[in-house]
Amino acid sequence: MCENKVPYFVLKFFLVGYCCFWLTVGGIILSIGIYAEVERQRYKTLEGAFLAPAIILILQGLVMLVVSLIGAVGSLRDNLTLLKIFMYTLAVFLVLELLGGIVILVLRSQTTKLINKSIRKGMQNYYDDLDFKNIMDYVQKKFKCCGGADYKDWEVNMYHNCSAPGPLACGVPYTCCATSKPNEVPNTLCGSKALEAQGPGTTIYQTGCTDGFLLWVEENYLIIGGLLLAIVVPQVFGIVCTYFYVSQIEQMEENALTSGKKPPRMFKMFMPQ
């Protein structure tokens, strides 16, 4: 029995710590999402959850909180039902993530079209939704791109359409403008008339942000690989740790029944009554 106590206590320590860590992370993400959503509602002029990153953060935080709480309670109480729910939930999420990655790779062209369609839909209301505007501005500056498929996508915006009145007509946002120096602040009207028939010249980025992001991924494959490992490895660790912990509990219960000996004090204390 002494030999069985060591892995039991070690597994319990790691599993409780694992669940508490992700419980804390989930709580932080949920708090950030709620704060962001409250701020978004104050200035919200556009309906549509796909343009609200706060909604994604809230959902992600809630899922992490609930799943981690199930694992924490299950590991503290040595409740096999909760532990198995926790383990199978992690396994399902891991499989879905892997399947999602495979689908994106196999259906790359369809995925690109869907992303470009969503971007164009957001660009229609670029000046009406601060969330989307901030994200689009950051992406265009970070990946040195303009629009979804290309810079001409900005024609869908009522202010940048060539038939619109005002100084923004037939132009693109200043975040599309090419800069020659790091942290250079371009003129806010540097993208003026970029959509005219003669073309934008070299004043703006002509590559679409979808292609710009994919190009960045190819150039920074080590970073992307590290991020993927950072997502997958913790889930695999949780699944493996829970599996061995459940096996250890079942073995100790079986040994206690066959030998008539009492289980370890902590095991007995946390067993469901």
Image: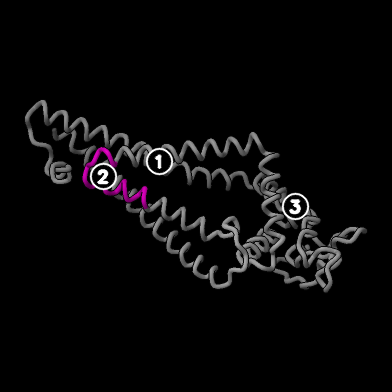
Asked whether the beta carbons under mark 2 and mark 1 sit within 8 Å of each other, the answer is no
Q: Is residue 120 above or below residue 95?
A: below
Q: Amino acid at mark 2?
A: Ser
Q: Which residue is mark 3?
A: 208
The kind of secondary structure element at disc 2 is: helix
Q: Which mark is residue 75?
A: 2
Three-letter amino acid code of the residue under disc 3: Gly
> Which is nearer the N-term, disc 2 or disc 3?
2
Which residues make up the magenta segment?
66-82
Q: Residue at x 26, y 48 (%)?
A: 73
Query: In screen coordinates, is 120 left or right of 50?
Result: right
Determine the secondary structure under disc 1. helix
Q: Judge left or right: residue 71 versus residue 169.
A: left
Q: In the rendered structure, does residue 76 fall within the stretch colored magenta?
A: yes
C-alpha separation, residue under disc 3 versus residue under disc 1: 36 Å
The quadrant of the image that shows the N terminus is top left
- Magenta stretch: includes residue 193: no
Neighbours of disc 2 within 10 Å: few (<14), some (14-19), many (20+): many
Q: Identify which residue, 264 or 209, lies in the foreground.
A: 209
The alpha-carbon separation of the residues under discs 2 and 3 comes to 49 Å
Q: Residue at x 42, y 44 (%)?
A: 234
Tell me the kind of residue under disc 1.
Leu
Label 1 sits on residue: 90
Residue 78's disc number: none
